[in-house]
Image (spheres, grey):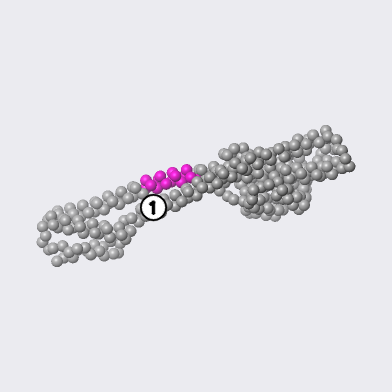
Amino acid sequence: MAMTALRREGRRFLLSPIPPNPSTAARSTMLSDNMMLYCRDLSLLGIRSISTQVVRNRMKSVKNIQKITKAMKMVAASKLRAVQLRTENSRGLWQPFTALLGDTPSVDVKKNVIVTITSDKGLCGGINSTSVKISKSLYKLTSGPEKETKYVLLGEKGKVQMVRDSKNSIEMTITEVQKNPVNYTQVSVLADDILKNVEYDALRIIFNKFHSVVSFIPTISTILSPEVVERESESGGKLGDLDSYEIEGGETKAEVLQNLAEFQFSCVLYNAVLENACSELGARMSAMDSSSRNAGEMLDRLTLTYNRTRQASITTELIEIISGASALTG
């Protein structure tokens, strides 16, 4: 008896023996059985299914990513409503100060402090990059031979980006501001810490003002020191409605301005942190929604590729079996 052997991928497969003089029908039947065993052995070794296995693993990874992005979108949506309500309520704190002391971003002073508010977490689109770009542009505008400009950074993402090329200009960094729900007491302590550690003529707070879930507006709020406010008022500059009020009691105008400036900074900073947190959650919702849709589209393409690969593998095996049978019967 003759023993039939086939080689594939460096492996030797022994098939069942074929009689020396079989009939044509018997020979074709035995060859078909041997080819079926051969294809089954190849399938067990993963030779034919290696490409489909890779696609299946990729599909599994994309499904897991899609689950994560959908969960992150739902978490951001649940947090957004509570933060949005507090943000809308905080807008009434700083608006009276703007009417009283004014907001003059074009004022020219010697000592500028840029307070950049960013997030501690990523995956929220370009919200942090926008704040950093505006901060750097403002730094160039307020810098000069006789001027001094420093950074105060709130948020880990802003710190990471600014340390690369502006390390020497960073005066303070504060992180994990939004680790717990933000309240006015917490922000007022931060504002007091900033005022104690920096010297300024103008504080310029950069943040993203919440407009809607899909849009935010980069905003700059300017807070002048009491000395600059008094100087501008004496020189005839119209800063706000302060001059239309009379000061009663034993406090001087300088003392009143000092108290107003400190309270104004804490109120504006509180609103800025909430506005930026609201914008962050809205941007994260949009980013995660886009990621989920992209993952769904990628999953559809991978499913189509998997089906095509599987069908091609089956068709190739059938062609090999039929070709081998035809060669032996011919």
- Depth check: 141 or 203 in front? 203
Q: Residue at x 17, y 53 (%)?
A: 326
Helix, strand or loop under label 1: helix
Q: Residue at x 32, y 61 (%)?
A: 45
Within the image, what quadrant is residue 137 found in? top right
Where does the magenta region start and end? 291-305
Q: Residue at x 44, y 49 (%)?
A: 63
Pick out the residue farthest to the top. 244
Q: Reply yes or no: does residue 197 show up in magenta.
A: no
The residue under label 1 is: 56
Pick out the residue farthest to the right. 250
Relative image position of residue 54 (x, y in whole percent): 39, 54
Relative image position of residue 307 (x, y in whole percent): 34, 47
Pick out the residue farthest to the bottom. 1
Left of 90 or right of it: where is 297?
A: left
Relative image position of residue 321 (x, y in whole percent): 22, 54
Residue 160 visible here:
yes
Within the image, what quadrant is residue 23 found in? bottom left
Residue 159 visible here:
no
Relative image position of residue 155 (x, y in whole percent): 64, 50
Label 1 is placed on what type of residue?
A: Arg
